[in-house]
Amino acid sequence: MNRSKNVCQAVLILLLTSFSVTAQSIKVKGAKEKDPIPPACESIAPANLEDVKALVKESNCKGSGDMFSDYTYVLTSIRREPRDKGQTKEVSLVYEVFMPILPNGSRGNGVLLVTSRDGVPVPPQELEKERLKAGERLEKEERKITSTTTSPAQPVANRTGMLPLGSYEPMTFGGRKAAVNIHTFLTNCDLTLVRREKIEGREMLVFSFTPHAAAQFEDNEKYIAQLKGEIWIDAQDRIVARLIGWPRTATQLNEKGPAVYYEMIRLPAGVWLPLETRVNGNDYPGLFNREIFYSVLSFSEYKRFSTEIKDQKVDSPP
């Protein structure tokens, strides 16, 4: 049996399903680099926990991996839009996501398949049809990748550094009008250690953060200049486990909840992947130019598969 048929069968076994109309509202893209040591990890050595600058560089490296693409997973998207008279409309979609295998130096698109809409599962007959379509889409994407890849890219010679332990996947919301990227926070903010605490039994170093005065942000990240917040770094793995941000003008930090939230999860294999990302444009409309609602992307049911993808981007619906 050829590989494309194997991939199609894997999609069926994993119950990957989709509505063709709604599956286009979220996109997952991947690009595989040619070297297992990404640029952010080149020449990086283990940092002393007392050396904040070195620890930040190591943490930036530790989340620069391509492990996210080695897994299928369930992606839940929730959006709450304010309505008249204080009412709120909530829209939720549940997807299962599968990525094609990418050779070094290539790019590709993931297959997203809707299993539930606003809490209502896809009807069984329609689900079965969409499973078959998903297999066809995946085969098509793999054929496209194969046809555009001339020869496997070779790793950079003599590159030394550290291997990542996880993937800080960039998340965009509102048709790319707002982006949440851990790398941006680590490279453009000042961190100050404020305390130590434990999460799930693991010791964390908790840092307050404020953006550099001279930091330059992309248009969809300019809101970061108005934030303050905290970043949790795992003391053993030296990777960001959580980030919470509020507007600098906020006084009661727990009254409305954070403006930005990003959390990672450590899988049994020791790999760190996204757990949940939130942006709160309902309570802080001015922070996002009144273009973003309250939006959540959450990830669950990770199942390891055999893919290798770098720098995926997960886009929420506009």
Image (cartoon, helix red, strand yellow):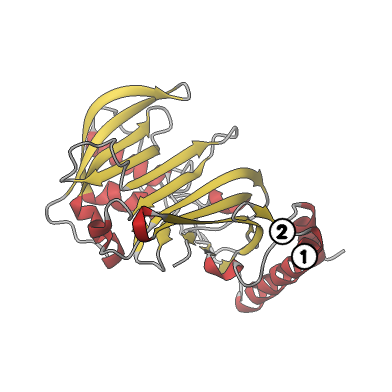
Disc 1, SS: helix
Contact (Cβ within 8 Å) of mark 1 with mark 2 = yes
Q: Is residue 270 left or right of residue 111?
A: left
* Residue 123 in the image, given as x and y percentages of width and height: 76, 59
Specify whether residue 152 is in view.
no
**Amino acid at pointer 2:** Val
Q: Is residue 90 left or right of residue 116?
A: left
* Residue 208 in the image, given as x and y percentages of width and height: 23, 36
Q: Is residue 210 left or right of residue 61?
A: left
Disc 2, SS: loop
* Residue 317 in the image, given as x and y percentages of width and height: 48, 65
Give the farthest residue toward the front: 85
Residue occupied by mark 2 = 122
Please tell me in which quadrant of the rendered image residue 214 appears.
bottom left
Q: Is 306 in front, or is 265?
A: 265
Q: Is 32 in front, or is 127?
A: 127
**Amino acid at pointer 1:** Glu
* Residue 102 in the image, given as x and y percentages of width and height: 61, 63
What label does residue 12 carry, if any?
none
Mark 1 is surrounded, within 10 Å at the Cα level, by few (under 14), some (14 to 19) or many (20 or more) other residues, namely few
Residue occupied by mark 1 = 126
> In the figure, 118 relative to 197: above or below?
below
